[in-house]
Image (cartoon, coloured by chain):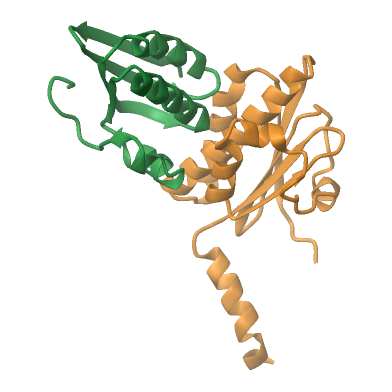
Chain colours: A orange, B green
Amino acid sequence: MIQSFDYIELKIPAKAEFLSVIRLTLSGIASRMGFAYDEIEDLKIATSEACTNAIQHAYTNNEHGEVIVGFGLYGNRLEVMVADNGKSFDFLSAKQGIGRYEENDSVEFLREGGLGLYLIESLMDEVRIHNKEGVTVFMIKYLEGERVERDVKTISKPDNS
Amino acid sequence: MNISIETKEKDHLTTVDISGEIDAYTAPKLRESLFHLAEKKESVIIINLSEVTYMDSTGLGVFVGVFKNIRSNNGQLRLLGLSNRLMRLFEITGLSTIMDISSKIEGEAK
């Protein structure tokens, strides 16, 4: 059941000047995967928002922290995980530890900037936030058409059997 | 990639040309240059964004703050030359219905 994927990880100092480096890397990865221009721009904004929050979080905690951005490259989608505790994670198991967040969850610092989290949710297909031992934002964007194809396969399954 | 901000003041009219990327790194510089303009009474500020290649919520936050300041000083703020991407940002967040924005570039702003 485990799909094969390529994994790329980036660790940056928690400083805003490196946000553009994340976006450049992400652009390269997403265009390599065949994402369209608008989807790449959506991904850049959502990932930047998550990293901005991670950097601000590390900053308010007065840490000279590091932010880790993990990219899971699947055939039909790109998964992006942003963690602000600076610790490397096992992509698959870290992913499993992340559930849906509740409205009242202590993600206030994400909301206080106002529009960051709102934009992430608007621009990505799936978003999950984990708030223990630092904050991890996990998001998915599907390649255009892939999601539909997958649904069609599921629906047409009974006919094939 | 950095940001470049060019300001031209003439009487009550100020035109600002912004080019580059607006993110958490460049936003403080932008905020600094726009906020002192917004302090003037009854000023009209026209900002040309046609050379802005990237912007996220930190940029939106700056423009919302400047907009509020200008309004409280009885001034006007217009954002011109928005790309489809920037338009989309203002539309998703509902700011397009509150602020005066346009994809076109008019008048002296080149």
Determine the residue positioned at 36% across, 27% down.
B52
Which residue is depicted at the point 53% across and 30% down? A24
The residue nearer to you, when weighing B10 against A27, is: B10
Q: In this picture, is B56 found above or below A7?
A: above
In this picture, residue B6 sits left or right of residue A89 = left
- If the image is split into quadrants, where does the C terminus of chain B sit? top left
Q: Is residue A71 left or right of residue B59?
A: right
| Residue A9 at least partly seen | no
Q: Relative to residue A64, is residue B73 drawn left or right?
A: left
Q: Nearer the viewer, residue B33 or A142?
A: B33
Determine the residue positioned at 29% across, 11% down.
Answer: B41
| Residue placed most toward the observer, A66 or A73 | A66
Counting from the top left corner in percent of width and height, residue B2 is at 45, 16
The vertical placement of A82 against B72, above or below, is: below
**What is the x, y in percent for residue A95?**
79, 49
Using the image, determine if residue A152 lies above or below residue B66.
below
* Position of residue B58 measured from the top left corner of the image (x, y, whole percent): 52, 27
Task: Determine which quarter of the picture holds residue A11.
Answer: top right
**Horizontal and vertical percent for residue A77?**
61, 55
Q: Is residue B96 visible?
A: yes
Q: Residue at x 80, y 67 (%)?
A: A1
Instruction: State the count of labels.
Output: 0
Q: Is residue A67 above or below residue B101?
A: above
Taking the image as shown, residue B24 lies to the left or right of residue A60, namely: left
